[in-house]
Image (tube, rainbow, N blue to C red):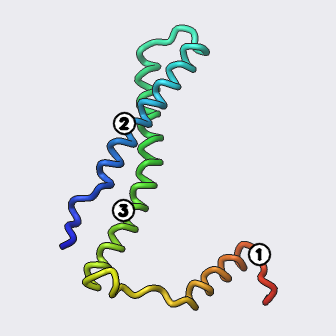
Amino acid sequence: MFVGGYNVIKHYRFAATIFLVSLCYLLGHIFSNLRVVGFTWWHNVILIVISYAVVTWFVDIDADAAEGISTSFLAENYKAQSFENMQLANPYFKYELATRSNRDAGLHDGNC
């Protein structure tokens, strides 16, 4: 049975956040030591807060999208009882989506 409370995305969020915040802090610290005269501990605090805020924003965008896709896939798989019983999208809808997105982007397929 599908358990919604546990997801691998939690581990991805934790690892990605720790790694990227550390990387941003180290790069910011190196750059700040080269450019700023009188680098104090307040600069370190501001650097950590800004790094954490920016990294968390981008990590959460990716993780939320991945979690939504995996949740919908697992829910549909649970409903269909197996992967073989899952219904795929009608090929007409795939063509319609592709031509509509091309038309919206200004790319014409010659039928317009």
The circle drawn on residue 59 is: none
Q: Position of residue 20 (x, y in %)?
A: 44, 37
Q: Which SS class for mark 2?
A: helix
Q: Amino acid at mark 2?
A: Ile
Q: How many marks?
A: 3
Q: Residue at x 55, y 89 (%)?
A: 91
Residue 18's disc is 2
Residue at the image point whose x is 46% and y is 30% from the top:
23
Residue 102's image quarter?
bottom right
Residue 32, compared with residue 12, is above or below; it is above
Query: Dot 3: what SS?
Result: helix
Question: In 3D space, how far apart are the residues under numbered discs 2 and 3 (Cα atoms)?
Answer: 19 Å
Residue at which label 1 appears: 107
- Measure how far apart labels 1 and 2 are at the Cα level: 42 Å
Q: Which residue is mark 3?
A: 67
**In the rendered view, would you say 36 is above or below 17?**
above
- Residue type of the residue flagged with mark 1: Leu
> Nearest the camera: 48 or 90?
90
Query: Dot 2 surroundings within 10 Å: few (below 14), some, or many (20 or more)?
Result: some
Query: Quick one: 112 or 54, which is closer to the camera?
Result: 112
Residue 2 place in picture, x, y as percent: 21, 71
Q: Residue at x 41, y 44 (%)?
A: 56
Disc 1 element? loop
Q: Amino acid at mark 3?
A: Glu
Mark 1 / mark 2, whichever is N-terminal? 2
Provide residue 95's location: percent of width, then percent of height: 62, 86
Closer to the chain start, of discs 2 and 3, is 2
